[in-house]
């Protein structure tokens, strides 16, 4: 299996005496010493700060990263609530964290893609081992057929909320130094980028093919509704506006609020669910060409699907918890799907190209809306704040854990 080349500390053979819930007094030391990590023990229902040996490069194509930052997302919180997430095989815990930024501190002898000192955002998914999986064998494990892929910090591989990581260079995406302050947003942005790439592919079915046009010349196929004003929704709104969509963001919080101001500052329209019903929103928007769902709320999403326009595309990006069945008007939805040529698809991130697009677009967003992009990051917190960030009330937009000592 490709991922077998990875060398990672053997957390599962840790001396339990090394585990600690407190704030370890010893700090990292490059190459030797110990390092800290935020780990979830699903069987014991515990979330802890642990200490262990730093990983070492063991193959010529590996690189070693000093982790600088990790973003906290809904998935991390779900894993910390023991609803999701799987430790590496044979282990009883998972080091979490998949949205990250690292600095290359060491490279194997055959490494060509990155150099010591480079900033990089590592990809999350690792391929399944089967020769028959054309997706994984084509390095598109985001489309894996077998379901036996791994995801660092989520499913079967330890993640990035730690001080050092070793991994193959092929999973590294270099980012320019100018993006140092916001690059931790690259991974969540890949969700929108992969969604948009597929929206364009679907739009190719229309003879006029919905070309990307400057915002001033919006044409058919360019009216988008974003559901949710979390980081994935707001980054999606930025990507849609940049691609020439007239963009509306529908979210819970009543007006005025900071997210609404951010939405307005990028040239999109914020609509509060407190004030406007979906009927009113649909009337205001006219033909809804694209719905980009970023809430993980299935009930709301299927309600909104009723208002999807002719030739419209509905993109699901959220992974809902299992809250039990809901009642939906399937006849109505199916009639619309057929009679209005609608397409519904789900998307999970992401391949290398998508990461590269996200890095380029983040630079564009930062150029157009520096304040809006920076304000997506609510704050930087030390590793010792993990309890509040993972188990406390969700606050702000994107909370980031600083992993530098
Ligand atoms: C991550 C994806 C991952 C998905 C499902 C998301 O939070 O960004 O990389 O595939 O969770 O595990």
Image (cartoon, rainbow, N blue to C red):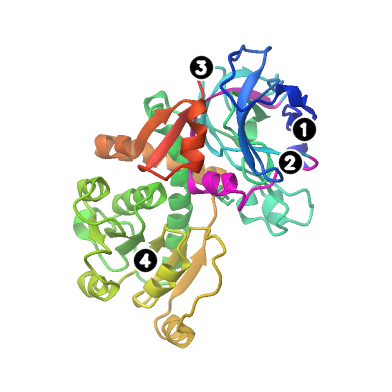
Q: Position of residue 158 (x, y in %)?
A: 66, 36
Spatial CA span between label 3 and label 2: 27 Å
The answer to whether mark 1 and mark 3 are in CB contact below 8 A is no
Residue 88 — which label?
Answer: 2
Q: In the image, what residue occupies the spot 73% across and 49% down?
A: 128
Nearest to N terminus: mark 1 or mark 3 = 1
Question: What residue is disc 1 on?
Answer: 12
Nearest to N terminus: mark 2 or mark 4 = 2
Front in this rendered view, residue 217 or 184: 184
Spatial CA span between label 2 and label 4: 38 Å
Nearest to N terminus: mark 1 or mark 4 = 1
Q: In the image, what residue occupies the spot 49% across and 58% down?
A: 318
Residue 290 — which label?
Answer: 4
Spatial CA span between label 1 and label 3: 25 Å
Mark 4 residue CB less than 8 A from any atom of ligand 1 = no
Q: Can residue 199 be seen in this view?
A: yes
- The magenta-colored residue range is 61-90
Q: In the image, what residue occupies the spot 31% across and 59% down?
A: 252
Q: Position of residue 215 (x, y in %)?
A: 23, 54
Residue 115 sits in quarter: top right
Quadrant where the N terminus is found in the figure: top right
């Amino acid at each position: 299996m490709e991922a077998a080349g990875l060398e990672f500390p053997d957390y599962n053979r840790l001396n339990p005496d090394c585990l600690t819930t407190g704030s370890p007094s010893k700090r990292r030391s490059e190459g030797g010493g110990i390092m800290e990590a935020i780990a979830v023990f699903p069987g014991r229902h515990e979330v802890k700060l642990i200490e262990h040996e730093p990983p070492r490069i063991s193959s010529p194509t590996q690189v070693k990263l000093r982790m600088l930052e990790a973003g906290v997302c809904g998935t991390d919180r779900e894993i910390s609530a023991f609803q999701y997430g799987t430790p590496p095989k044979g282990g009883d815990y998972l080091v979490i964290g998949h949205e990250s930024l690292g600095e290359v501190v060491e490279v194997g002898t055959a490494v060509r893609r990155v150099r010591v000192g480079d900033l990089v955002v590592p990809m999350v998914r690792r391929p399944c081992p089967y020769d028959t999986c054309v997706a994984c064998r084509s390095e598109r494990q985001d489309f894996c057929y077998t379901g036996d892929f791994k995801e660092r910090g989520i499913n079967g591989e330890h993640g990035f909320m730690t001080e050092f990581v070793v991994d193959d260079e092929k999973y590294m995406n270099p980012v320019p130094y100018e993006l140092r302050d916001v690059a931790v947003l690259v991974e969540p942005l890949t969700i929108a980028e992969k969604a948009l790439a597929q929206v364009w592919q679907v739009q190719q079915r229309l003879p006029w093919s919905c070309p990307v046009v400057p915002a001033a010349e919006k044409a058919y196929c360019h009216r988008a509704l974003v559901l949710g004003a979390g980081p994935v929704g707001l980054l999606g709104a930025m990507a849609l506006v940049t691609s020439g969509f007239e963009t509306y963001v529908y979210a819970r919080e009543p007006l005025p609020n900071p997210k609404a101001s951010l939405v307005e500052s990028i040239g999109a329209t914020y609509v509060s669910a407190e004030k406007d019903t979906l009927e009113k929103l649909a009337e205001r928007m006219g033909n809804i060409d694209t719905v980009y769902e970023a809430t993980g709320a299935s009930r709301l999403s299927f309600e909104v699907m009723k208002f999807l326009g002719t030739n419209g595309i509905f993109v699901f990006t959220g992974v809902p918890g299992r809250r039990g069945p809901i009642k939906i008007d399937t006849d109505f939805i199916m009639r619309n799907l057929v009679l209005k040529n609608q397409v519904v698809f789900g998307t999970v991130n992401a391949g290398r190209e998508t990461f590269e697009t996200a890095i380029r677009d983040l630079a564009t967003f930062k150029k157009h809306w520096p304040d809006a992009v920076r304000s997506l990051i609510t704050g930087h917190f030390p590793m010792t704040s993990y309890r509040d960030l993972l188990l406390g009330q969700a606050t702000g937009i994107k909370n980031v854990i600083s992993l530098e000592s």
